[in-house]
């Protein structure tokens, strides 16, 4: 039976601290609309996006009060009456990603850019997300979780993994090419190293500190650069790539300096893939060199349902491993703090089985 109340991490208003509420309502099975499903969560990953969204850093505002969170894994315990052609059924283990729902019929959805749909529902932003025991999601968009990967590990594939996987697919690189990963020791970055290696790319990992260095090297980075210690990062990258620069860079940092350097160290014809989402910073690029080097600057925002399935399958085969630390829901704020202070290698995953 489904309880009427649950524990949830609730943001009452923008910039306020998050409070753990034990009496947050659970939408009951008979209240679900067609197409909606209720997911009982096992766990959920902590993405830097949740920190941007709840701190008021972004130019767009979330619903309030808000339960944030968008890397949830759990099982379907109810499906709305009169749901047609559901690809999932009761009891299925599924993932809840940032894109919770989209119309599937507009030009963007038809072109496979569900994230650009005007009717998009975002888990933990314009609808409640996964820092709770239960979440309402959508049968067409939840990601089936294959056997062979446990829920704790699958969680971070749903945003961090999916995003960097999709970004690499759009990076216009080939096996053997050099890909730079600024932010390589973080949630997205440590997965970007592995998906890139899986795709046969050479990887230059950039981040800071001994712990992240060890992690990046262990995950297969060919070259490591500590951005706080390097005297000339652009020169270091050029040297590592035979003087030509990198073919692409997957910028997952929340700082603008990493974007500016990217324009300088990609080789002619290279791509700068913008992934990090600081809300107020601007991308300061040399127009002249962008033009004469034929550089493409490409924004890359999460991914569609197929990207999610592919990224998850690669992880389920053990080709990509999530480095995570399990924590409790009341450690959420502390985890955000560690993140903005750059002292969190890999991911934190919150245990929701209580
Ligand atoms: O769809 C998208 N584009 C998408 C999806 C998910 C997340 C974008 N994001 C965004 C988040 O909102 C956030 O802005 O990507 C960014 C990174 O998310 P994350 O991986 O969850 O954050 P993190 O674990 O804190 O990793 C950031 C890393 O960057 C390093 C930090 O040390 C940290 O390890 N870093 C920073 I900040 N500045 C750096 C620099 N100049 C740097 N590394 C290298 N050079
Ligand atoms: Zn995310």
Image (cartoon, rainbow, N blue to C red):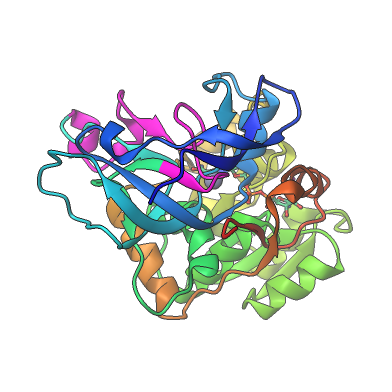
Q: State whether residue 38 is above or below residue 61.
A: below
> Could you say which is closer to the camera, residue 292 or residue 206?
206
Q: Give the residue displayed 40% in from the left and 73% down from the top.
A: 314
- Could you say which quadrant of the image residue 256 lies in? top right
Q: How many dots with numbers?
A: 0
The verdict on residue 178 being magenta is no
Q: Position of residue 86 (x, y in %)?
A: 16, 50
Residue at 77 percent across and 57 percent down: it is 344
Q: Position of residue 106 (x, y in %)?
A: 18, 28
Q: Is residue 128 magenta?
A: yes
Of 343 and 178, nearer the camera is 343
Do we see residue 215 in this rendering?
A: yes
Question: Magenta span: helix, strand or loop, mainly?
Answer: loop
Quadrant occupied by the C terminus: bottom right
Residue 199, can we see it? Answer: no
Pick the front one: 157 or 81: 81
For residue 120, side relative to residue 9 (left or right): left
x then y, percent, for residue 273: 51, 46
Magenta stretch, residue numbers: 106-135
Q: Position of residue 151 (x, y in %)?
A: 49, 67
Against 303, residue 285 (above or below) is above
Residue drawn at (43%, 53%) of the image: 40
Q: Residue at x 80, y 51 (%)?
A: 342
Q: Is residue 351 left or right of residue 176?
A: right
Residue 60 higher or lower than 188, as above or below: above
């Amino acid at each position: 039976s489904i309880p009427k109340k649950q524990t949830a991490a609730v943001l009452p208003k923008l910039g306020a601290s998050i409070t753990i509420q034990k009496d947050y309502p659970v939408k009951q099975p008979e209240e679900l609309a067609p197409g909606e499903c209720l997911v009982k969560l096992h766990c959920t990953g902590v993405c830097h996006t949740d920190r941007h969204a709840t701190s008021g850093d972004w130019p767009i505002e979330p619903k309030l009060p808000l339960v944030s969170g968008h890397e949830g894994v759990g099982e379907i315990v109810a499906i709305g009456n009169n749901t047609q052609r559901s690809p999932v059924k009761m009891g299925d283990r599924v993932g809840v990603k940032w894109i919770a729902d989209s119309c599937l019929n507009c030009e963007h959805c038809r072109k496979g850019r569900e994230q650009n749909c005007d009717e998009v529902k975002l888990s933990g932003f314009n609808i409640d997300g996964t820092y709770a025991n239960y979440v309402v999601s959508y049968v067409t968009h939840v990601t089936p979780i294959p056997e062979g990967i446990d829920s704790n590990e699958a969680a971070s594939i749903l945003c961090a993994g999916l995003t960097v996987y999709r970004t690499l697919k759009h990076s216009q690189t080939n096996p053997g090419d050099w890909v730079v990963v600024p932010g390589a020791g973080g949630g997205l970055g440590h997965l970007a190293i592995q998906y890139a290696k899986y795709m046969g790319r050479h990887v230059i990992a950039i981040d800071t500190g001994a712990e992240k260095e060890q992690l990046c090297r262990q995950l297969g980075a060919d070259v490591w650069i500590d951005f706080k210690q390097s005297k000339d990062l652009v020169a270091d990258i050029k040297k590592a790539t035979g003087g030509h620069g990198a073919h692409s860079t997957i910028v997952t940092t929340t700082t603008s300096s990493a974007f500016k350097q990217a324009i300088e160290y990609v080789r002619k014809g290279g791509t700068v893939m913008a992934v990090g989402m600081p809300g107020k910073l601007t991308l300061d690029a040399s127009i002249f060199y962008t033009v004469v080097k034929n550089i493409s600057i490409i924004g890359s925002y999460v991914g569609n349902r197929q990207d999610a399935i592919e990224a998850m399958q690669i992880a389920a085969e053990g080709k990509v491993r999530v480095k995570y630390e399990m924590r409790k829901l009341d450690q959420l704020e502390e985890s955000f703090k560690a993140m903005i202070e750059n002292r969190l290698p890999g991911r934190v995953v919150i245990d929701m089985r209580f």
